[in-house]
Image (tube, coloured by chain):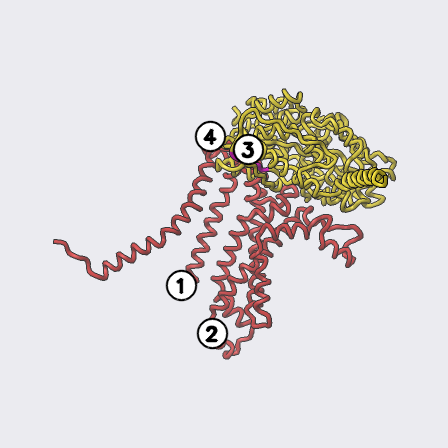
Chain colours: A yellow, B red
Amino acid sequence: MLLTAVRPARRQLLRGGALLTAALATGCAHEDEGAFATGSLSGGPAEAFAPPDHRLSGSLRILMWSHFVPTHDSWFDAFARRWGSRVGVDVTVDHIDLGQIPTRVAAELHAGQGHDLIQHVAPLPQFEPAVLDLADLVAEANRRWGPQLELCRRSSFNPRTNRWYAYAPGWVPDPGNYRRSLWAAVGLPEGPSTWDELLQGGTRIRRTTGIRLGLGMSQELDSNMLGRALLWSYGASVQDAQGRVALNSPETVAAVEFMARLFRSAMSDEVFAWTAASNNHGLVAGQLSYITNSISAWRTAQRSNPDVAADTYFRPALRGPAAALASYHLLYNWIIPKYASGAAAAQEFLLHYTANYAAATYASKLYDLCAWPALTPDLPTWLGRDPFRAQPPDKLALLADAARWSADLGHPGPTSAAVGEVMSTFVIPNMFARAARGEVSAAVAVADADAQLRPIFRRWRDLDA
Amino acid sequence: MVTRAPYRRRTAEQDTFLARLFVLPTAGYVIVLVAVPVALAVAYALSDVTVAAPRYDWVGIANFAAVLKDQVFWRALTNTLVFTTLTTLVAVVGGSVVARLLFAKVFGRRVVRVCVLLPWTTPVTLSSVSWLWLLDPVYSPLDWVGRQTGLLGTGASVNWLGRPTLAAACIVAVQAWRLTPLTAVIIMTGLAAIPASVREAARMDGAGPLRRTLSITVPLTLPVTAVAALFCAVFSATDMAVVRILTNGGPTHATEVVASWAFAKGIDGGNLSEGTAAALFLTPVLLAAALAILRAARRVELR
């Protein structure tokens, strides 16, 4: 009798303990970076595995960037090794700073040896002659998961040569990050929705608090993205749909004049010297009222400056006279060099990785978004109720349709090697900066930039021919 | 009938053979690591190769013509010459002062020497990143000191790297900071080589410190100082790490130098042939500097 009475109590106790442990594990896992290092995602999607059609062997060397969200790399490394052990491939993953990747790729391609699979955070069209055409891989991915997002497709395909120089399974949007308390004080609690509101509100915030806008005009990646967003919003662009230089237009001059006004009214010289991390630093330090960036600055603030994180909200692309378009913040390009001995394994791995992109999104704390939206059915739920403790939980909900207001770097033309060289030589940020600094008029800055673009485009067109 | 060469001649022939044998590793090193890359660079500059295309098409001097039309290149070339001249001036003057301080018999001289040498022994990338943090627009400790001492207003920042002239001054300052120890050590060897009897004789003749410096120290260390200056100029002109890390050539190419621009064009931008052509513009200048170094070294040797 005693025994029977005790048994249910013990069972209840054990069950209660198990539930408590599970609840604690779920609650703490998101705070525990180590949880991702095990390769398992507590509370995240389960890993799917489909055996490859043919037998694989040998090794696969992967080179990729050191992710801004470190939990992603912990997850990815374990994920890749786990796949390797299942299919009989020895996988190694090397992470390097994103700024070093183009140099490393160039060195490996020239040497004819190195990694079998390389990832960069921007398109790599300049390497097309030395990498495999991934048309079959993209076709297989489209067959499995439906059509790829247009901005990812356009950032990995060369319409002139009809070759897929890269595989683009994911991307990162570039919303506006704004401090709600500051913008509420100037009557815009939801943040600016147009470039004009940004100018009016940013000016008043600076005048009353000394806190500046943080829009880079420096020789770095973010400034390139921002400059293009402003151009598109004014109906201007670097090139037209056919890939011909189209910069020198009244719309571009108007956009440059606007940026000069914005600088004089609401910014300081700091924006000319920024690195890619500077606007993040400024936001986290509470010194900037608005920046355009991924969500990584805010994720950093969640840990290092919770007050600023709680006060930081997001806005989609700002509307200009012609459109409301932002560039993507990052776009993942995976390339397989022609010399790669592990090319077959690399392609199989990319399919496996894409099939599990929901896990990549989760491990990156919703930083990376998938090029095949059908693969992340839970994304709207996650964005509407952030698993990583956003306050309020739906702070990221606007990213659910980020593809609608985002464009690729070459927009409206193809992302060609010429576009890549224009980006690497910072023609667009410097065009804005020269006018903003008052070195030359907007019209002269645009004409000079246009003159810099033409030989670059001519040269790459000749090479393509 | 076979006649044997005299003993002395045979020995001389053996010496010549041995001398050539000993030079062989150095010659091989120079050929593989200097001559071949330079030849390759010239070949690239005369072609249309890109960073990924193995195809070699001869284009003659088209790349050089394109470089000469490029406004940014001219700015980079001007900056290179200005930065190199200023860096060399500051480093040589600073190095002379430091060398004399290090040469003086003071307590803890060895520790001081190690400390002075640190900027030179630290990898340039590491020291540049340290300077980047020191000059950061948001977290600069220099700005913080300025704010604490009232030199800057609340929340104000100098924006060290955001203003063209100031950014250029920062580049020169960092280059001079890292090259001053090198010039100091070279000049110190010159100071050490001055016979003590010469100084003593001058002192006995009634020459004061200024007179001894102007009539003995400066003339006798001049060849070594020239070597130091030329080393400094070459290191400064060819370095791109400081610029790339501190400003990446900005703002608006105000700190762009030929090396950084050639890298941005050739490697980052994929336009390898034009980038190489830009880089080759430095070759005559550096070659002249190298010849000058050798001549100055020869003068030192003949003293």
Residue corresponding to mark 1: B302
Instruction: Report the mark closest to the observer, 2 or 3.
Output: 3
Instruction: Report the mark closest to the observer, 1 or 4.
Output: 4
Q: Residue at x 49, y 77 (%)?
A: B200
> In the image, which residues are magenta?
A58-63
Query: How many neighbours does mark 4 have within 10 angstroms: few (below 14), some (14-19), or many (20 or more)?
Result: few
Discs 1 and 4 carry the same chain letter = yes
Q: Quadrant of residue A8?
A: top right
Residue corresponding to mark 2: B198
Tag 4, which secondary structure?
Answer: loop
- CA gap, disc 4 to disc 2? 65 Å
- CA gap, disc 2 to disc 3? 78 Å
Amino acid type of disc 1? Leu
Discs 4 and 2 carry the same chain letter = yes
The x and y percentages for residue A133 are: 54, 25
Please tell me whether residue A82 is drawn above or below residue B186 in the rendered image.
above
Dominant SS of magenta comes to strand
- The disc at residue B55 is 4
The x and y percentages for residue A143 are: 63, 20
Discs 1 and 3 carry the same chain letter = no
Question: Of marks 4 and 2, which one's residue comes earlier in the chain?
Answer: 4
Report if the CB atoms under discs 1 and 2 are less than 8 Å apart: no
Amino acid type of disc 2? Val
Q: Quadrant of residue A172?
A: top right
Give the farthest residue toward the left. Answer: B1
Amino acid type of disc 3? Gly
Report if the CB atoms under discs 3 and 4 are less than 8 Å apart: no
Residue corresponding to mark 3: A88
- CA gap, disc 1 to disc 4? 51 Å
- Quick check: A76 left or right of A193? left
